[in-house]
Image: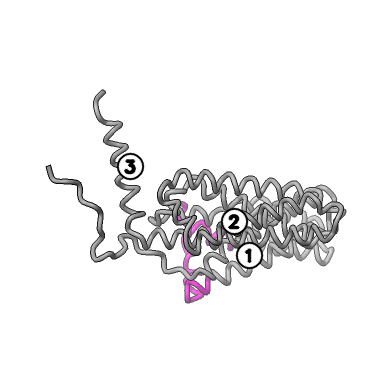
């Protein structure tokens, strides 16, 4: 019998075409959308608990973040009309269509909540807007994970079940960091708890994603992505530890905020870089396919 041939792609060319996305625009878009969405949820919780100054700061942060995220998306699209053209139809099966409508609805609602908090006017309308932004916030923070995993990029699609939870944990850690950085120490009780929760959630989702990816997880350990993901783990863990001390030290709160925000940035850029690396290496495309075929053949074989 002829021995099984080793895999080689045609002239070493990638099988899957890597997305033609600029890292600064799209990875930044991932981070800013997460910060905005989770910030609105945390702002609503803080306002309900009486932490009005920190809640107002997060509302302003959220509307600023979603504005920058939209600008980054439009910049990557190249022509502003390409964004508005996506609003001509509603296509629930398209993550891009759903995401475009989320941004279009969430932005004005988050803006109304921030305007009311800053000016002190229309408090009832501001409360309604705060609640609306909090309802839309989780979708805004995580839909980018669905958008990425809906592609054929091995490192993203292979972790399609875990990636939304990874982005959610990273977003919550970033929003908590913003609250610790901008809010007075007396109002950081909730943010300290959510910082630890976000860090634990991100770590657990990252571990689960690596297990599911198998050999493809090498893209999260090597090269630029590996360095970013290692930095993210160190920064997030440091930020969570400092968050526990922030109730007694303003300096610890500032340090925690900076570390958590930086860790979230590294996570988004690391996941982005891992996806691009996995698409460029044909082994990460064919390897999982062969593993699935082998598993299907073993399960279909008679006992």
Name the secondary structure under disc 2: helix
- The answer to whether residue 35 is seen in the rendering is yes
| Label of residue 137 in the image | none
Residues at marks 1 and 2, CA–CA distance in whole angstroms: 9 Å
Mark 2, Cα crowd under 10 Å, few <14 / some 14-19 / many 20+, is many
Residue 278 location, x and y as percent? 40, 58
Residue 292 marker: 3
Question: Which of the colour schemes (rainbow, by chain, secondary structure, one colour) is used?
Answer: one colour
Disc sitting over residue 66 in the figure: 1
What is the quadrant of residue 12 in the picture?
bottom left
Q: Is residue 97 left or right of residue 300?
A: right
Task: Label 1: state its secondary structure.
Answer: helix
Closest to the observer, 292 or 183: 292
**Looking at the image, is 85 positioned above or below residue 217?**
below
What main secondary structure does the magenta stretch of the protein show?
helix
- Tell me whether circle 1 and circle 2 mark residues in contact (CB < 8 Å): yes
The stretch drawn in magenta includes residue 208: no
Counting residues from the start of the chain, the first of labels 3 and 2 encountered is 2
Q: Of 203 and 35, which appears nearest the observer?
A: 203
Q: CA distance from mark 3 to mark 2?
A: 32 Å
- The residue carrying pointer 3 sits among few (fewer than 14), some (14 to 19) or many (20 or more) residues within 10 Å by Cα, namely few
Q: Earlier in the sequence, mark 1 or mark 2?
A: 1
Q: In this figure, what is the number of numbered marks?
A: 3
Residues drawn in magenta: 74-103
């Amino acid at each position: 019998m002829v021995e099984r041939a080793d895999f080689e792609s045609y002239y070493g060319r990638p099988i899957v075409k890597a997305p033609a996305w600029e890292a600064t625009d799209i990875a930044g878009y991932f981070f800013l959308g997460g910060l905005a969405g989770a910030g609105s949820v945390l702002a609503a919780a803080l306002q309900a608990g009486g932490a009005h100054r920190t809640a107002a700061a997060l509302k302003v942060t959220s509307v600023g973040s979603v504005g920058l995220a939209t600008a980054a998306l439009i910049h990557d699209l190249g022509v502003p009309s390409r964004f508005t053209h996506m609003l001509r139809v509603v296509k629930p099966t398209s993550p891009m269509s759903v995401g475009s409508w989320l941004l279009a609805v969430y932005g004005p609602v988050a803006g109304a909540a921030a305007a009311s908090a800053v000016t002190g006017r229309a408090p009832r309308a501001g409360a309604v807007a705060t609640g609306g932004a909090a309802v839309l916030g989780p979708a805004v923070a995580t839909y980018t994970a669905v958008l990425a995993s809906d592609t054929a990029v091995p490192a993203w699609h292979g972790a399609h079940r875990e990636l939304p939870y990874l982005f959610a944990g990273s977003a919550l850690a970033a929003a908590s960091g913003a609250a610790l950085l901008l809010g007075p120490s007396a109002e950081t009780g909730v943010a300290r708890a959510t910082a630890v929760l976000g860090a634990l959630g991100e770590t657990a989702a990252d571990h689960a994603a690596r297990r599911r990816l198998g050999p493809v997880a090498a893209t999260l350990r090597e090269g630029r992505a590996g360095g970013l993901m290692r930095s993210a783990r160190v920064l997030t863990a440091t930020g969570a530890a400092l968050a526990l001390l922030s109730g007694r030290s303003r300096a610890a709160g500032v340090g925690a905020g900076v570390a958590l925000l930086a860790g979230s940035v590294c996570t988004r850029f690391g996941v982005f870089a891992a996806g691009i690396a996995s698409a460029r290496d044909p082994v990460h495309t064919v390897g999982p396919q062969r593993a699935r075929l082998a598993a299907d053949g073993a399960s279909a074989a008679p006992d």
